Image (tube, helix red, strand yellow):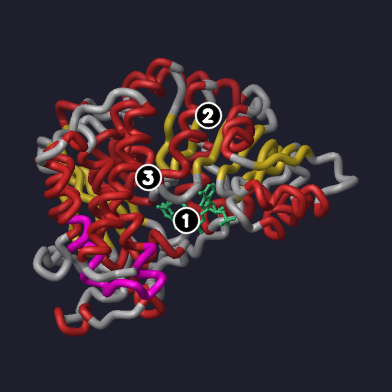
Amino acid sequence: MVLGEQKNERAELRAMKAGAGQSVQRLSVLGATGSIGQSTLDLVGRHPDRFEVVALTANGDVKGLAELAIRHRAKMAVVADPEGYQDLAKALSGTGIVVAAGGDALVEAASQPADCVVASIVGAAGLVPTLAAVRQGRRVALANKECLVAAGELFMREVSAADTELLPVDSEHSAAFQAIGASAARDIEAITLTASGGPFRNWDHERLKAAKPEQALRHPNWSMGAKITIDSATMMNKGLELIEALHLFPVTISQLDCVVHPQSIVHCLVSYRDGSVLAQMASPDMRTPIALALSWPERIDTPTKRLDLAELGQLTFERPDDRRFPAIRLAREAMAAGGAAPAVLNAANEVAVMAFLENRIGFLDIPAVVSDCLDAASSGALCRAVDHIDEILAVDLAARELARSMLEKRGVA
Ligand code: NDP
């Protein structure tokens, strides 16, 4: 478990230090130009005395990265795409900000001396730099859930070895973290993640079949990057989050559940052996869980809209529909299979989501491709036990190849 009993001493120590005079927190943001990255930097801008920006990274958005690096006086700006180097160097010339590009530079950015690294790259592309931050003993505020899906055991082992902290940014996991507090693992009966149900919650099979990317990208409650918004529509996001929760919290697969809650106000429920259920609530604004991951064990101000339950009137809950949204079941199957199966699920999903966003496959093809890949991988070497980052990266690569071949089989160019 990341958090919880054994970390309480450290939390107390931090709180004492904080009480003795708060020091500036050095922060690096991997994936600074994205939705989570920008929400993080919004908080940084609201607390100029509290945070100092070290390194910021992006994939190809040179202009966005340069603006953020200048505004937040970053020491280093890194673009993953080497082709962006010249433009970034030009945009930041004369500022004193160190500029670099490429995969090794991402790792360098993640390894810069910092108190906290926000891991907000999307997809398995974040694995290596996030792991580098963990190995340097940095506190990692983890949004990049794909790291724990593809390499959960490895990550948690490295977190322990580095004696550092992995704090969840995902709102559901942040909620579970808060609802668990210092409770003993033996007292927890179940963790129930809530799901908004996405934009297609009430759509029938025929409508889902014809759903277009622009419709799937219209999330009712959250404003997020494209990949997670599509994951939300297929409900694969909840599947990935169940796997994430398995690694973060001291529970077994059978203790993990999810429930559809269209208002996205209750983010998670933790049930205890005495029949108590503790839930965390907040308006749907990622700045609240990001703020907690940055400031824990303290709390800092955020502009999140305050809850007015009387104004909301009612909070509703329903079971996910496995027939229309099979992604949660697929994630459960991968979680139960263990080994590299979750990495296969993740890679196949990334390929299928991209194909859907490019209008190359239909909405229902996304879980179908993932299912085909899991089936094909289960009988082969792909689903072996994986112990090392190189093995996980090899599985990720092979699963992407497999997913592309599944697309070809479906006649997709
Ligand atoms: P976005 O698509 O908005 O941003 C992704 C960021 O990662 C951008 O900075 C992007 O750079 C960068 N990036 C993309 N591909 C690569 C690559 N190959 N190498 C290096 N950097 C890359 O995503 P979100 O902010 O929405 O999500 C980020 C992560 O947080 C995801 O794992 C998501 O599941 C998780 N998350 C997001 C939530 C949200 O509300 N958005 C909520 C909970 C979790 P560029 O801009 O240059 O393309």
Q: Is ligand 1 less than 8 Å from the beta carbon at label 3?
A: yes
Instruction: State the residue position of label 1.
Output: 286
Location of residue 33 in the rendering, given as x and y in whole percent from the top left corner: 60, 55
Give residue 222's quadrant in the image.
Answer: bottom left
In the depicted view, which residue is nearer to us: 308 or 188? 188
Numbered tag placed on residue 314 in the rendering: none
Give the magenta range. 354-371
Numbered tag placed on residue 145 in the rendering: 3
**Mark whose residue sits in front, 1 or 2:** 2
Badge 1 vs badge 3, beta-carbon distance below 8 Å: no
Give residue 73's quadrant in the image.
Answer: top right
Location of residue 267 in the rendering, given as x and y in whole percent from the top left corner: 31, 54
Which comes before the other along the chain, label 1 or label 3?
3
Q: Is residue 357 above or below residue 98?
A: below
Instruction: State the residue position of label 2.
Output: 133
Dominant secondary structure, magenta: helix
How far apart marks 1 and 3 lie (CA) works out to 14 Å
How far apart marks 2 and 3 lie (CA) works out to 15 Å
